[in-house]
Image (cartoon, rainbow, N blue to C red):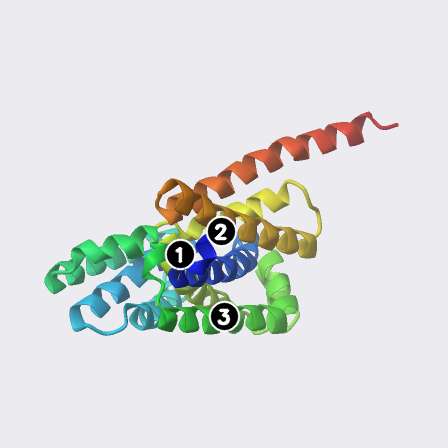
Amino acid sequence: MIELLSYDFLRRALIAAVLVGVSAPAVGTFIVQRRLALLGDGIGHIALTGVGLGLLTRSSPTILALIVSALGAVAIELLRVRTRTGGDVALALLFYGGLAGGVLFANLSGGSANLNSYLFGSISSVSTSDLYVVAGLAVVVLVTLTVFGRELFVLCQDEEVARASGLPVRFLSLLIAVTAALTVVVAMRAVGLLLVSALMVVPVAAAQQLTRGFRATIGLAMVVGVVAAVGGLWVSVDADLAPGPTIVLLAMAVFLGAVGTGRLIRMRRTETP
């Protein structure tokens, strides 16, 4: 691994993997608590339209994915709150629209082959400018969660309690959605749009098997995320595999290990007089 770090593109990929491993589970903890585990998946599909527009207009796919996914996140929240459309239906509508728009624009651009690197991740495609954008977005995500963490925690536990406590529920709901959109763009280059939701959910599910408190869960989820992202990147380079699927499968393996370990811990607690 040390020898591999002599390559510039691998150093950039490693930094991106660490940023993804920290930020995706951090946001995912709030999303899972609010029972919106598929929100990241929906936003990933919407971001695909931004990538397609970037390929078509020969502009930065990362910047356009950021703009389109943020607008899509706001649209999901407004559809959920202001119409009779349920959250799952709102997600499904933007799933299909985002996927169709992305494929259509990519085909029109003649660069549909490049779409695969955005769908499933590509370590060689993380440019220096991409890394600056990813690092900036990761900082924004983590600072937002730190500043509004207490309010977001109350909202995710019970929306009615948050409203009765005088918290700006609509603003906080939009904040979670937009923060999730930023995280999708952070993870897009390393994990891929179709798999980014897994890194927002699976590390959190693994951490929940071993922890009880919210802070412990979010901390352990971030550790699992970094281990899966960096470990998956290393395995993908060593075995010449696609990085996104490798990272996700490693996270799934950690989840299965956490399930077994959690059961053993609970059994010992039960047996202890």
Q: Quadrant of residue 73?
A: bottom left
Residue 231, x across and y down, in percent: 51, 47
Q: Compared with residue 168, is residue 47 higher up or lower down, i.e. above or below?
A: above
Checking the image for residue 223, the label placed there is: none
- In three-dimensional space, the C-alpha distance between marks 1 and 3, rounded to whole angstroms, equals 24 Å
> Relative to 175, does residue 252 appear above or below in the rendering?
above
Asked if marks 1 and 3 touch (Cβ < 8 Å), the reply is: no
3 vs 2, front mark: 2
SS class, disc 2 = helix
Residue at 50% x, 65% y is: 176
Query: Which of the marked residues, 1 or 3, is nearer the chain's N terminus?
Result: 3
Foreground tag (1 vs 3) = 1
Q: Which residue is mark 1?
A: 190
Say which element carries label 3.
helix
**How far from the left and from the top, in percent, is residue 196?**
41, 53
**Distance from label 2 to label 1 (Cα)?**
8 Å
Task: Specify the farthest residue to the top.
Answer: 271
Residue contact between numbered discs 3 and 2, judged by CB atoms under 8 Å: no
Lateral position of residue 142 relative to residue 266, left or right: left
Amino acid at circle 2: Ala
Q: Residue at x 16, y 68 (%)?
A: 56
The answer to whether residue 28 of the structure is visible from this angle is: yes
Residue at the spot of label 3: 175
Residue at position x 41%, y 72% in the image: 133
Q: Secondary structure at mark 1?
A: helix
Disc 2 + disc 1, Cβ < 8 Å? yes
